[in-house]
RNA sequence: GUGGGUGUAGCUCAGCUGGUAGAGCGCCUGGUUGUGGUCCAUGAGGUCGCGGGUUCGAGCCCCGUCACUCACCCCA
């Protein structure tokens, strides 16, 4: 086999990076459970009809197909890999609605696939950590306030840059455009969302060309898009533009509730940012986008929103609200800039040195004793010179080497960072907690 | 799908107007004969992405192709 080359867009981490990923995921998991979210996993595939029906026509879905199809059979399986975790979850809720208790809070940490051209921060296979709260018939607004706080809690304590959550409400944009007399409010939302990329002039041009917006309308749209505030003051700013609409009022009230509560509970976390739209059009209320300080160019690392009709079978409707952390996007950026790493690249805390091959059984026994106390231990691969064996540990970041027989005649443990070596009682010795498992840290 | 950039040692990269392929780091071995890191000395390792063309001669020029990468689109 030729030497393989990486597949663009399908990242694979090295063991040390994987340790970081595992610990990040473990932290997310712990926090989500602490907030009462139950874990759910869904299959990798969904029926194409389901994937595409949710307004995701633009999504580049990977389609599943059997290689050994019947001759002349060109049809695919009708299955596609999911591109997020919200759509599969909505399907799961409908399918199991009779067995679930509502409101239902679940978290889901799985890979997703999108057949897009990869570039920095965008992969074709990537992990999302998703939380959603879904209810039957109606969903109280307080959940839209709760979710950002859970996310902040989950990311707190990890060695990653601060996050800033930008929040808007679909009703605000939609109501505003409608009250303004814009022909196609949804299209207007999409255009205004590009303001960071193409600037106010570009947005104005598109609004005029594609939606026949008048100069006055364009001006009002741009003014609206520029509104941003860490508190409720955005409400007055919108009112000052003189647009009245029932939906707009509703949205402003909801958004004000989210922002003011967040400001009180987690100062600096949330900003009302009226340009935020989100491409996915199943959102009906609050929408969230999150930037990492210093990595704004990456785009959003945690997005979501409220959806009222995504999970609906015509008879029953299950409105929900959710947020998804882009685990791969965050880690890829941090790894790429050497901002986070693990203290070692293996779980092993102790390497048992091997004096000679004939003593391997004895060394295995020593290792077993430590393992009974949850100390990750391995025996040296070969009875090389001790210098080599110590180096084996050092290269991997293993903090301790255990010598079966030191000068004292009994087992001795060596902290290879300090070089300190002391006789050890095999039945009681345990490393400091910090050395028990690899830990994640800022920097390389 | 469209456009730009880049492919040389395990990694990061030099390689002049076309003339027999280099460095740093890493790795092996030894100095140190069974206790690492520093230092010193050695050594191994390359289909120059792949295919074709021009030329006495191609890593370098031309054509094609593949991969990676950046941007557009869209998004975690």
Image: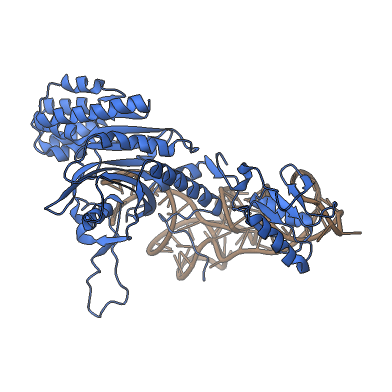
Chain colours: A blue, B brown
- Residue farthest front in this picture: A427
Above or below, comparing residue A410 to residue A296 in the picture: below
* Image location of residue A402, percent across then percent down: 73, 53
Q: As drawn, is A399 to the left or to the right of A337?
A: right
Nearer-the-camera pick, A354 or A193: A354
**A17 to A301, vertically: above or below:** below
Which residue occupies the extreme bottom position in the image?
Answer: A71
* Any part of residue A120 in sight: no
Identify the image quadrant of residue A418: top right
Residue A147 visible at all: yes
The mark total stands at: 0
Tell me the residue at 18%/55% (across/down).
A53
In the picture, measured across the screen, residue A159 lies left or right of residue A354, that is left
Q: Residue at point 63% right, 53% down?
A: A373
- Residue at image location 28% in from the left, 57% down from the top: A61
Q: Nearer the viewer, residue A214 or A85?
A: A85
Q: Quadrant of residue A166?
A: top left
Give me the residue at 10% from left, 25% from top: A244
Residue A208, how many percent across, how many down? 13, 34
Vertical position of residue A188 compared to residue A93: above or below: above
Left/right placement of residue B15 relative to residue A245 reads: right
x, y percent for residue A235: 21, 22
In the depicted structure, whether residue A188 falls above or below residue A23: above
Q: Quadrant of the C terminus of chain A?
A: top right
Q: Nearer the viewer, residue A163 or A180?
A: A163
Residue A178 locus on image (x, y percent): 10, 33
């Amino acid at each position: 086999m030729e030497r393989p080359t990486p597949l663009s867009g399908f990242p694979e981490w090295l063991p040390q990076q994987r340790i970081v990923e595992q610990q990040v995921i473990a932290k997310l998991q712990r926090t989500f459970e602490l907030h009462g979210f139950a874990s759910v996993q869904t299959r990798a595939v969904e029926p194409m009809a389901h994937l595409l029906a949710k307004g995701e026509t633009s999504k580049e879905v990977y389609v599943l197909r059997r290689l050994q199809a019947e001759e002349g059979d060109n049809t695919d399986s009708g299955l596609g890999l999911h591109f997020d975790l919200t759509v599969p979850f909505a399907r799961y809720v409908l399918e199991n609605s009779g067995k679930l208790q509502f409101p239902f809070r679940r978290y889901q940490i799985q890979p997703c696939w999108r057949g897009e051209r990869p570039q920095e921060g965008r992969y074709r296979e990537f992990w999302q950590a998703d939380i959603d709260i879904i209810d039957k018939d109606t969903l109280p607004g307080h959940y839209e306030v709760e979710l950002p706080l859970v996310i902040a809690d989950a990311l707190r304590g990890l060695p990653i840059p601060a996050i800033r959550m930008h929040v808007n409400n679909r009703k605000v944009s939609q109501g505003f455009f409608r009250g303004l007399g814009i022909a196609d409010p949804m299209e207007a939302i999409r255009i205004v969302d590009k303001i960071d990329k193409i600037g106010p002039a570009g947005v104005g041009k598109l609004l005029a060309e594609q939606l026949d917006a008048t100069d006055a309308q364009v001006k009002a749209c741009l003014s609206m898009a520029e509104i941003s505030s860490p508190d409720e003051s955005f409400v007055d700013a919108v009112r000052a533009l003189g647009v009245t609409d029932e939906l707009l009022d509703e949205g402003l009230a909801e958004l004000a509730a989210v922002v003011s509560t967040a400001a009180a509970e987690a100062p600096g976390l949330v900003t009302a940012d009226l340009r935020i739209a989100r491409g996915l059009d199943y959102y009906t209320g609050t929408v969230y986008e999150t930037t990492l300080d210093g990595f704004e160019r990456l785009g959003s690392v945690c997005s979501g929103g409220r959806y009222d009709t995504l999970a609906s079978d015509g008879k029953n409707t299950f409105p929900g609200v959710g947020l998804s952390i882009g685990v791969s996007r965050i880690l890829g950026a941090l790894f790429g800039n050497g901002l986070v790493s693990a203290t070692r690249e293996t779980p092993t805390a102790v390497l048992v040195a091997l004096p000679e091959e004939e003593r391997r059984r004895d060394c295995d026994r020593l290792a077993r004793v430590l393992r009974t106390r949850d100390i990750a231990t391995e025996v040296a691969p070969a009875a090389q010179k001790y210098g080599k064996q110590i180096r084996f540990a050092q290269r991997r970041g293993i903090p301790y080497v255990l010598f079966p027989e030191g000068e004292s005649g009994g087992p001795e443990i060596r902290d290879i960072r300090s070089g300190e070596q002391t006789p050890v009682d095999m039945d009681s010795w345990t490393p400091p907690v910090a050395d028990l498992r690899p830990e994640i840290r800022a920097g390389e």
